[in-house]
Amino acid sequence: MKYVNIKMLLVFCLTVTLIFSVCAQKPTLKNAFDGQFYIGAALNEWQIVGNDVSAISLVKAHFNSISPENCFKWERIHPQQNKYRFELPDSFVAFGEKNRMFIIGHCMVWHSQVPKWVFIDSLGNQLSRDALLKRMHDHILTVMGRYKGRIKGYDVVNEALNDNGTMRQSKWLKIIGEDYIEKAFEYAKEADPNAELYYNDFNIEQPSKREGAIKLIKSLQAKGIKISGVGIQGHYHLNRPSLKDIDESIDEFSKLGIKVMFTELDVNVLPSPKNFNGADVSQDFEMDKTLNPYPKGLPDSVQTQLAKRYADFFKIFVKYKGKVTRITFWGVDDAQSWLNNWPVRGRTNYPLIFDRKCMPKPAFFSILECAKSSQ
Ligand code: G3I
């Protein structure tokens, strides 16, 4: 009898200890939104090679999806005709697999960051349609073929539209014609039939560009071409775009029967130079003190606005859980963000939810609150 009591006491103590240790664990983003959508982060080179120890420990704790910020772009992975550079992409994929993450490939066909050689022959003449299609085919088959079954989703075509919804006059369009997009998706399916295939762009939550994206997606679907989802990049500001546009775009895109994801989320808190818009990387403006108002730290009032802005986004995302399948932040912490150098070089920006010391910002906690209220 005495023995049974001691045993029961022991079991009771162990259970209590276990409950306490689970409760004492710090909440993580990926657990908070488990069963709703993936929480992703874009990784830069320094993180992929493991040098940025603090950021990497955040990635392991909070994220269950990763995107490569730069190392899969054509100029990086395929700088010369007969030369592929797979060292970093291999490490990126190995890291994702080791940590059981949903791995994204970004991006196969884009107007930017493509070396000049891709579009010309050995004499410097512009390639023919067929020759460029062959290059696109070889590139997609080689890259996606290497990671077949391991990378789960690809931004197959990136930023093919202008803000008014018309097709961007890229070299792909000019040399191949409008069907370059269908070809890219067909080649991607050929390379890895089970991978999710996405169209990815910025500003497509805004009505005119959204209309262009819907038209493009419908035309692929009408031809029986596989497209699994749309990536709304989500390079946002404190006061734009409107929440209404974000909400309506999820609704409209999901009605096409495809997954909707926010693939490059961040919030630029700095003033915009005149005539600046969107996320086109070619924009470059002169530095001026008025454009860099917070070099020594973000004022509390702006920190609060940022937290509210992120909470407003996540309230919409959880409203559409099941339709929204992934939220990826474009970076891990503020120090890493591309927005410190774009569209003006050398600014101090605060667009993410972890600060320069990899500590959670109020925005992090406001997002967690949204998860609680969505359960
Ligand atoms: O790594 C080199 C470094 O060696 C060199 O000294 C330095 C000099 O400028 O450049 C460094 O490379 C830069 C790289 O970012 C890493 O910081 C490139 O110049 C710069 O062009 C590159 O910018 C990237 C940009 O795409 C263009 O590829 C940003 O990091 C990246 O965040 C941004 O991501 C894009 C998405 O792919 C598509 N959607 C828009 C988004 C933001 O522009």
Image (cartoon, grey):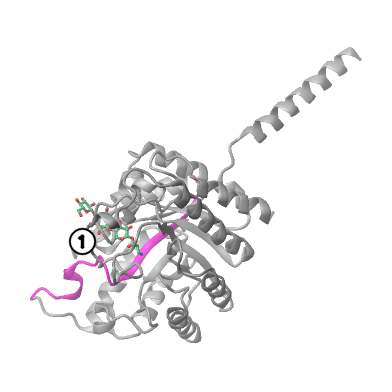
Q: Position of residue 229 (x, y in %)?
A: 50, 70
In the picture as drawn, the residue positioned furthest to the top comes out as 2
Q: Is mark 1 within 8 Å of ligand 1?
A: no
- The residue beneath circle 1 is 286
User: What residue appears at the point 74 percent right and 28 percent down from the top-left corner?
Assistant: 16
Q: Quadrant of the N terminus?
A: top right
User: What residue appears at the point 40 percent right and 76 percent down from the top-left corner?
Assistant: 186
Work out whether 297 lies above or below 220: above
User: What residue appears at the point 35 percent right and 56 percent down from the top-left corner?
Assistant: 69
Q: Closest to the observer: 186 or 51? A: 51
Q: Position of residue 204 (x, y in %)?
A: 44, 74
Q: Position of residue 343 (x, y in %)?
A: 28, 62
Segment tinted magenta in the rendering: 99-123
Amino acid on which disc 1 is placed: Glu
Work out whether 324 lies above or below 62: below
Task: Look at the image and tell me whether residue 34 can be seen.
Answer: no
Q: Residue 110 lies in magenta, yes or no?
A: yes
In the picture as drawn, the residue positioned furthest to the right comes out as 1
Work out whether 196 lies above or below 167: above
